[in-house]
Image (cartoon, rainbow, N blue to C red):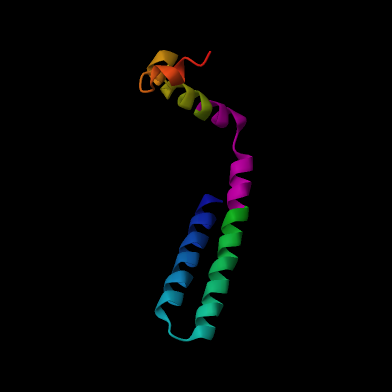
Amino acid sequence: MIQRCHKWRQKRKQYIDQARQTSDEIERERLLQAAEHYGRIVNAEQGKIDSSRDTKEKAAAEAAVAAEAPENNEDEDAGFPDFITNLK
């Protein structure tokens, strides 16, 4: 799935590059429509990839993000003036 998605992204980029280089308006529009078509295919395929990921992978990723977050809330408030942090 991922390889197909990569291939379609390359094809889309190729069409966009060709559209930028052509001076014929009709050909440019045709190339941009083809690029848009591949963009829709990529979005649909990426949705399938995202939905097929295992929930364990998602949980592991969320845990990694949570581990990087500062544990002490006072550290987060250190850059704000007292009138903002003392709104209790």
Quarter assignment of residue 76? top left
Is 48 magenta? The answer is yes
- 38 and 4: which is toward the camera: 38
- 62 and 10: which is toward the camera: 62
Percent position (x, y) of residue 1?
Answer: 56, 51
Q: Residue at x 40, y 17 (%)?
A: 82
- On the question of residue 16 being in view, the answer is yes
Q: Residue at x 47, y 14 (%)?
A: 86
Percent position (x, y) of residue 71?
Answer: 43, 15
Q: Residue at x 54, y 78 (%)?
A: 29
How many dots with numbers? 0
- On the question of residue 72 being in view, the answer is no
Q: Residue at x 63, y 41 (%)?
A: 52
Which residue extends farthest front?
83
Left or right: 36 in relation to 6: right
- 32 and 77: which is toward the camera: 77
Is 52 magenta? The answer is yes
Decide: is 87 above or below 49. above
Task: Give the magenta part as a residue range.
Answer: 45-60
Q: Identify the main secondary structure in magenta.
A: helix
Percent position (x, y) of residue 47?
Answer: 62, 48
